[in-house]
C-alpha cells in the first residue's frame, strides 16, 4: 500500500489549490458547527448547574396581598416540593452621579438568612444582617453599571419615602440570569436593578406584615406544573392573583430558552448548508479526478490491487482534505466561541461560564464533516471500483457530436470560431456545465444569505422605531389612573401630543398553546403607537382583538377565530373575543384592543396605565426630569434610549455573526469559482495547446478558457439569487422568536452584493487561470497519453 500512499501525496500536491479551496469550505461548516454546539453546550450545562445548586423555582405567582394562611389552600397540590412566600415591590432608585431615573424591583429575604428558593450567589460582601433595616444586596449587573460595591450607598423611594440604603453585598440569582424589566425587551443595567432586603423591613415599609404578594414553588422531579398552577390560581384569585405561571413564562428563563433554541437551529442549519456545498464540490472534483485516472486505476487493478484498496485510496484522498478542513474549523471555531463567551457573559449573568471545546464536540464535528464528504464522493469512488481493467486501459470512446439548435440559426455564422468552441463545449457537456453553475450558484446563495441578514436587521429596526413607535417618551403609572390624567400631561411644557393606554396581563388560549402577554387598550386610531397591518395602518375595531402575526401563528389562530382571553386583573374574567386582525410587528409579541372595550371587560371606568408622549426635543431633558418627579409615576422611558440599547445588542450579536458569515461566504465563493476554473483548465490544457499549435493566437486560446468561465459565472447569478432566497427563508423560519423576527425582505442591494461577490471571485479566478495559461508548456501538454 506504500505505492498508493505515495500516489495520494502526489495527487494532493497536484491538487493543492483545489484541495485548499475545498478544505476552506469544510472549515467554514465545521467552524459554524463548533461555535453553535460549544455555545449551546456551555450555556445548557451552566444553566442547569446554576438552577440546580441555587434552587430556581418551578412556579411563580404574584398577588395584590394575601395572608400567610393562603398558602395552605394549595399546599397539598400534587407535585409540590417547597413553597416560599415573599414581598416584592417596585422602587425608584437614585445613584450619585447618575441623573436619569432608575427603576428597580425589591425582593424580600428571610431575615439574616438565605431564601429556600432562588438562592443568591454572593459575588462580594454578605447578606443583610438581622435587624439591619437599611442593608440591601444588589444585583451584579446593576452594581457593575454604576461602579457600586459592598459598603457603598444608594437611595430608594420606598412606598413614597426617600430612604438611604447601604449595600451589604453584590449577588447573582437564577431568577435574574437575564436581568430585564417586565416592560422592556432588552437589559438596561443602568436604569433597572434588582435589590434584596430583609423581609421584616420591606414588609413594614409596604404594610405586608403577616402577608405576602409573591410566592414561588419548587416541584418534585418529573411533576407536571399545570395542576399546581391551576390549584394556585383557584386559591389566590380572591387575593388579587395575577395568574400563576411556570418557568417557561418567567422572563429571564424565557429569553435564555429562546437563545438556546436559536443556537440549536444554528447548529442544525448553517453547518448543513456549508457541508452540503463541500460535499457537492468533492463529488465534482473526485469524480473528475477518477475520470482522468482511468488508465492508472486499470494498471493498479492489473497489478493485483483489489476494489477495497482502490476505494480506500480515494477515500483517504478525500479524508486528507477533510481532516485539513476540520483542523482549521476546530481551531477557528474554538477561538470564535471564546469571543462569543464574552458577549454571552454580558447578557446572561452566571457565577461562571467557561466555553471549552469538549472532546465530544470535536468528534461530532469531524464525524459530520467526514460523513458529508464520503456521501458526496461515494458515487465517484463507486465508479472507480467498478472499472474493468481491460476497459479502463482503453481511452474513453469519442463522444458523439451533432449539430445543435444553435448551429442551425443564422446568428451562428456571425460568431467567431473561439466563441463557437465555447458554446459547443457547454452545450455538449450539459451535465458538467449544470453542475458548475449549481456550484457557483450555491456559493453566491451563501453571499446573499449573509447580505440579507445585514440589510434585514436594519429594516426591522427602521420599521419598529421609524414607523411603529412614533412617541418620544413612554410613561408608566404605578397603578391605573383616570383617563383625565392625559389632560394634565398635555399642559406640560414641551409636550406636543399625548396618547394613553391601558395595559392588562392576560392569558391567551389558542389551538396549539397558551401565552401570557400584556394586552394593550388603545385609541381607535393610535398615532403614536401605530399598528401596521397588511392593508396599511391598523384601526382597532369596537369589538375583538388584534394580535401580532407571530403570536397568532404560535397560537394557531386565524382572523375570525375566537380567542379565549383570561384577564388576570380586576374581576379575573375569562371571555371569548374574535380575532379581528393581525399586526405585522417585527419586535416583541402583543395583543391590542379598543381601550373602552377593554375597560368594560375589566369592569372599570375609563382608566389608563400609562401614556405615550411626543415631545419637543429641545425641552425633552427638563420634561423628563419633571415627569420622573411626579407622584404615581413608576417609570419614564426614552424611546431613543431603547433604540440605542437594541441596536447595541444586535450590533454585538446578530451583526457580528452576520459579518463573520459574509466573510466565510466570500471566501467560499472564491474557493468554488477557483475550483471550477482549475478543473476546467486541467481538462482542456491539451486541447488549448493543440489549438495554439494549429495557429490560434494566445488571445484566442485564452478567450476559449476565460469565456467559458464567464458564461458559467453569468449563468450562476440567477441560481445564486434563487438559492440565496431559499437560504434566507430557511434562516428566517428557524430564527424567529418572541424577542424579534427579522423580516423576509431581500433588498436589491443584497441581490447586487451577491452578484458582485460572484463576479469579483470569478474575475480573480480568471486572472489566476490566465496566468497559468501563459506559462503552459505546450510540448509537455501535447505528450498526454492516448
Image: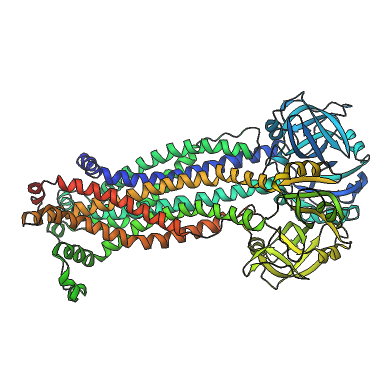
Hey, which quadrant is residue 51 in on the image? Answer: top right
- Quarter holding the C terminus? bottom left
* Total residue callouts: 0
In the displayed structure, would residue 152 be above or below residue 106?
A: above
Q: Position of residue 674 (x, y in %)?
A: 28, 49
Q: Residue at x 52, y 46 (%)?
A: 655
Q: Position of residue 109 (x, y in %)?
A: 83, 35
- Quarter holding the N terminus? top left
Q: Position of residue 146 (x, y in %)?
A: 70, 31
Q: Is residue 530 left or right of residue 653?
A: right
Q: Position of residue 340 (x, y in %)?
A: 54, 39
Q: Residue at x 60, y 42 (%)?
A: 44
Residue 386 visible in image:
no
Q: Is residue 636 left or right of residue 343?
A: right
Residue 544 visible in image:
yes
* Scheme by which the image is coloured: rainbow
Q: Residue at x 84, y 53 (%)?
A: 232
Q: Is residue 152 left or right of residue 681?
A: right
Q: Residue at x 77, y 69 (%)?
A: 577
Amino acid at each position: 500500500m506504500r505505492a498508493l500512499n505515495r500516489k495520494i501525496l502526489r495527487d494532493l500536491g497536484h491538487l493543492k489549490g483545489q484541495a485548499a479551496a475545498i478544505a476552506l469550505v469544510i472549515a467554514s461548516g465545521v467552524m459554524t458547527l463548533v461555535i453553535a454546539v460549544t455555545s449551546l453546550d456551555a450555556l445548557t450545562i451552566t444553566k442547569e448547574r446554576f438552577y440546580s445548586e441555587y434552587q430556581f423555582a418551578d412556579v411563580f405567582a404574584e398577588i395584590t396581598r394575601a395572608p400567610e394562611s393562603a398558602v395552605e389552600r394549595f399546599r397539598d397540590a400534587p407535585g409540590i416540593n417547597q413553597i416560599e412566600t415573599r414581598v416584592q415591590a417596585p422602587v425608584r432608585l437614585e445613584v450619585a452621579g447618575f441623573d436619569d431615573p432608575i427603576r428597580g424591583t425589591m425582593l424580600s429575604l428571610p431575615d439574616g438568612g438565605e431564601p429556600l428558593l432562588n438562592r443568591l450567589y454572593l459575588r462580594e460582601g454578605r447578606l443583610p444582617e438581622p435587624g439591619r433595616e437599611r442593608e440591601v444586596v444588589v444585583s451584579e449587573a446593576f452594581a457593575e453599571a454604576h461602579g457600586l460595591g459592598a459598603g457603598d450607598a444608594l437611595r430608594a423611594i420606598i412606598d413614597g419615602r426617600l430612604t438611604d440604603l447601604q449595600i451589604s453585598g453584590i449577588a447573582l440569582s437564577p431568577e435574574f440570569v437575564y436581568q430585564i424589566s417586565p416592560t422592556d425587551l432588552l437589559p438596561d443595567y443602568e436604569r433597572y436593578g434588582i435589590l434584596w432586603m430583609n423581609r421584616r423591613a420591606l414588609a413594614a415599609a409596604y404594610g405586608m406584615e403577616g402577608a405576602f404578594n409573591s410566592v414561588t414553588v419548587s416541584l418534585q422531579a418529573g411533576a407536571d406544573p399545570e395542576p399546581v398552577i391551576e390549584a394556585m390560581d383557584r386559591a389566590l384569585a380572591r387575593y388579587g392573583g395575577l395568574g400563576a405561571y411556570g418557568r417557561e413564562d418567567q422572563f429571564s428563563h424565557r429569553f435564555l430558552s429562546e437563545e438556546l433554541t436559536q443556537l440549536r437551529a444554528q447548529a442544525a442549519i448553517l453547518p448543513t448548508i456549508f457541508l452540503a456545498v463541500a460535499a457537492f464540490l468533492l463529488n465534482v472534483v473526485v469524480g473528475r479526478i477518477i475520470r482522468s485516472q482511468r488508465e492508472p486505476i486499470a494498471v493498479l487493478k492489473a497489478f493485483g490491487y483489489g476494489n477495497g484498496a482502490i476505494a480506500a485510496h480515494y477515500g483517504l484522498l478525500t479524508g486528507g482534505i477533510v481532516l485539513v478542513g476540520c483542523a482549521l474549523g476546530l481551531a477557528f471555531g474554538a477561538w470564535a466561541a471564546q469571543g462569543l463567551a464574552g458577549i454571552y457573559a454580558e447578557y446572561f449573568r452566571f457565577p461562571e461560564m467557561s466555553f471549552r471545546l469538549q472532546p465530544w464536540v470535536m468528534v461530532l464535528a469531524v464525524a459530520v464533516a467526514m460523513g458529508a464528504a464520503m456521501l458526496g464522493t461515494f458515487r465517484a469512488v463507486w465508479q472507480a471500483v467498478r472499472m474493468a481493467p481491460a476497459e479502463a486501459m482503453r481511452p474513453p470512446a469519442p463522444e458523439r457530436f451533432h449539430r445543435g439548435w444553435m448551429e442551425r440559426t443564422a446568428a451562428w455564422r456571425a460568431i467567431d470560431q473561439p466563441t463557437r468552441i465555447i458554446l459547443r463545449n457547454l452545450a455538449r457537456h450539459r451535465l458538467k456545465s449544470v453542475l458548475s453553475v449549481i456550484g457557483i450558484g450555491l456559493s453566491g446563495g451563501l453571499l446573499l444569505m449573509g447580505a440579507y441578514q445585514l440589510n434585514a436587521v436594519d429594516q426591522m429596526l427602521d420599521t419598529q422605531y421609524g414607523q411603529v413607535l412614533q412617541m418620544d417618551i413612554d410613561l408608566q403609572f404605578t397603578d391605573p389612573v383616570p383617563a383625565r390624567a392625559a389632560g394634565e400631561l398635555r399642559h406640560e411644557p414641551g409636550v406636543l401630543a399625548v396618547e394613553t393606554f391601558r395595559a392588562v396581563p392576560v392569558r391567551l388560549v389558542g389551538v396549539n398553546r397558551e401565552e401570557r402577554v400584556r394586552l394593550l387598550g388603545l385609541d381607535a386610531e393610535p398615532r403614536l403607537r401605530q399598528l401596521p397591518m397588511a392593508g396599511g395602518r391598523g384601526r382597532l375595531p369596537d369589538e375583538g382583538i388584534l394580535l401580532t402575526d407571530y403570536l397568532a401563528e404560535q397560537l394557531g389562530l386565524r382572523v375570525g377565530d375566537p380567542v379565549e382571553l383570561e384577564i388576570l386583573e380586576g374581576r379575573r374574567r375569562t371571555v371569548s373575543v374574535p380575532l379581528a386582525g393581525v399586526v405585522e410587528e417585527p419586535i416583541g409579541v402583543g395583543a391590542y384592543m379598543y381601550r373602552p372595550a377593554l375597560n368594560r371587560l375589566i369592569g372599570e371606568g375609563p382608566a389608563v396605565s400609562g401614556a405615550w408622549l411626543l415631545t419637543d426635543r429641545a425641552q425633552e431633558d427638563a420634561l423628563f426630569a419633571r415627569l420622573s418627579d411626579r407622584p404615581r409615576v413608576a417609570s419614564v422611558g426614552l424611546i431613543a434610549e431603547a433604540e440605542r440599547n437594541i441596536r447595541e445588542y444586535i450590533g454585538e450579536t446578530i451583526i457580528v455573526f452576520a459579518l463573520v458569515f459574509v466573510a466565510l461566504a466570500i471566501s467560499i465563493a472564491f474557493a468554488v469559482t477557483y475550483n471550477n476554473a482549475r478543473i476546467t483548465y486541467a481538462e482542456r490544457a491539451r486541447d488549448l495547446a493543440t489549438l495554439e499549435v494549429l495557429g490560434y493566437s494566445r488571445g484566442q486560446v485564452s478567450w476559449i478558457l476565460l469565456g467559458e468561465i464567464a458564461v458559467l459565472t453569468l449563468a450562476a447569478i440567477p441560481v445564486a439569487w434563487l438559492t440565496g432566497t431559499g437560504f434566507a427563508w430557511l434562516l428566517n423560519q428557524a430564527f424567529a422568536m418572541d424577542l424579534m423576527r427579522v423580516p423576509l425582505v431581500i433588498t436589491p442591494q443584497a441581490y447586487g452584493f451577491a452578484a458582485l461577490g460572484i463576479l469579483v471571485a470569478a474575475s480573480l479566478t480568471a486572472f489566476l487561470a490566465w496566468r497559468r495559461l501563459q506559462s503552459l508548456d505546450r510540448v509537455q501538454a501535447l505528450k498526454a497519453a492516448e
